[in-house]
Image: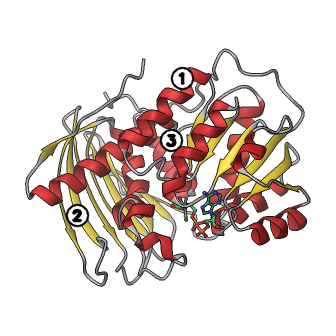
Amino acid sequence: MNAAPTSPPNPPGPSSSPSVSASLGVSVVGLGTMGLRRLTALRRLGSARLDLVYDVDAGRCREAAARFGCRAAGSLAELVGSPGTELVFVCTPNAHHEDSVRSALEAGKHAFCEKPLALDAAGAGRIVESARAHRRTVRVGANLRQFPQVRKATELITTGAIGRLRIFRGWIGHDGSKLRSEWYRHPEVSGGGTMIDNGVHLLDLAHSWMGPATDADARTMEFASSRLEDYVTADFATREGGIVQVVSSWVERSGYFYLEVHGELGFLLVDGRSSATLTWGGSDADAPRVFDYSGEPRDSWDREVSDHVERIRLGGRGRPDAEDGRAVLEMVDAAYRSARLGRRVPIETGARRS
Ligand SMILES: NC(=O)c1ccc[n+]([C@@H]2O[C@H](COP(=O)([O-])OP(=O)(O)OC[C@H]3O[C@@H](n4cnc5c(N)ncnc54)[C@H](O)[C@@H]3O)[C@@H](O)[C@H]2O)c1
């Protein structure tokens, strides 16, 4: 048996969800790279109605409102208080996620938050509590889940094609040139270096496929940077007896990610370097099967946005949710603590998923 995947495909929404509306009122906070990317995806959807945008940079706010045909808010409070908004996309730097998401929840709105959910697991825990108290949903941005080779891997894992998972081993990263905004290099705003930036994508997959981790052993390196780790290697034990090994990097010379998952009945090689392929092998003598998605459009952000708008419009919810986001940050916190202390550390978990 597999460890029960922590992300069922279509979980039900909260009982107080509004009835189905023809189009969902959506607003966006933070109008940099990701905010504009989400707005572009939202504009293509017939099922979303853009209401307000907000950015601390008023010029950016006016520009985005004009470009996307919606209204510019003068404050976060005005945006979350708008009766025309049901779902708020939070696309600010990491340090502002918690405040923005909790403001949306307190105003009775659902939230979609870019990864990482907060600066640390404690912040994510406060979001979990707020979502419960206000009976609203939170989804964390995890567009790697939408890559075609990753979607195929999830399908094979959840249908038991490779049996109980034992090993997850992967790396992810880039050469640092994607860090276009200065805030990424300030720990008080980012929460950390490459682990909380890129590593979280792999930790999210590992947690979703293999369940919660119990302890961590990590090393970090400041290779080209003087303030933050730009290379980290971490391994985790899972509650189900599996091993997760992750390398995250801002000094990677080529490609974006590569990972392997080994189960009791077979293995998957998920390649996101120069190609987009999924290789599925069994423990029998059959030749591995290769699924090649290299010619497919790079539409992971669009897919994620349309999937989520549709779920919320129909009164559902999406994963990873706030509890998943907290579990990932518990892994990140433990990795940083382990690197600091120079030893393996237990993962303190606040999980209470029923
Ligand atoms: N899923 C992914 O693959 C992915 C990729 C890149 C970034 N991200 C995440 O998206 C988020 C945004 O990253 P980015 O690269 O777009 O950043 P960015 O610097 O390009 O944009 C951030 C925007 O937020 C605005 N802002 C800052 N503080 C604010 C506040 N308190 N309220 C409102 N607006 C505020 C800034 O003026 C800026 O316009 C980060 O959390 C990052 O980790 C996710």
Note whether residue 280 is visible.
no
Nearest-to-viewer mark from 3 and 2: 2
Q: Quadrant of residue 233?
A: bottom left
Q: CA distance from mark 2 to mark 1?
A: 34 Å
Q: Quadrant of residue 249?
A: bottom left
**Which quarter shows the N terminus?**
top left
Are the residues tagged 1 and 3 within 8 Å (C-beta)? no
Are the residues tagged 2 and 1 within 8 Å (C-beta)? no
- Return the residue at label 1: 132
For label 3, count other residues whose C-alpha is less than 10 Å away and answer few (under 14), some (14-19) or many (20+).
few
Q: Secondary structure at mark 2?
A: strand
Q: Quadrant of residue 191?
A: bottom left
Does residue 83 sit above or below 236 in this rendering? above
Q: Secondary structure at mark 1?
A: helix
Q: CA distance from mark 3 to mark 2?
A: 28 Å
The numbered disc on residue 155 is 3
Nearest-to-viewer mark from 1 and 3: 1
Residue drawn at (70%, 32%) of the image = 107
Q: Amino acid at mark 3?
A: Glu
Q: Is residue 347 left or right of residue 138?
A: left
Q: Secondary structure at mark 3?
A: helix
Note whether residue 156 is visible.
yes
x, y percentage for residue 56?
68, 63
The numbered disc on residue 233 is 2
Q: Earlier in the sequence, mark 3 or mark 2?
A: 3
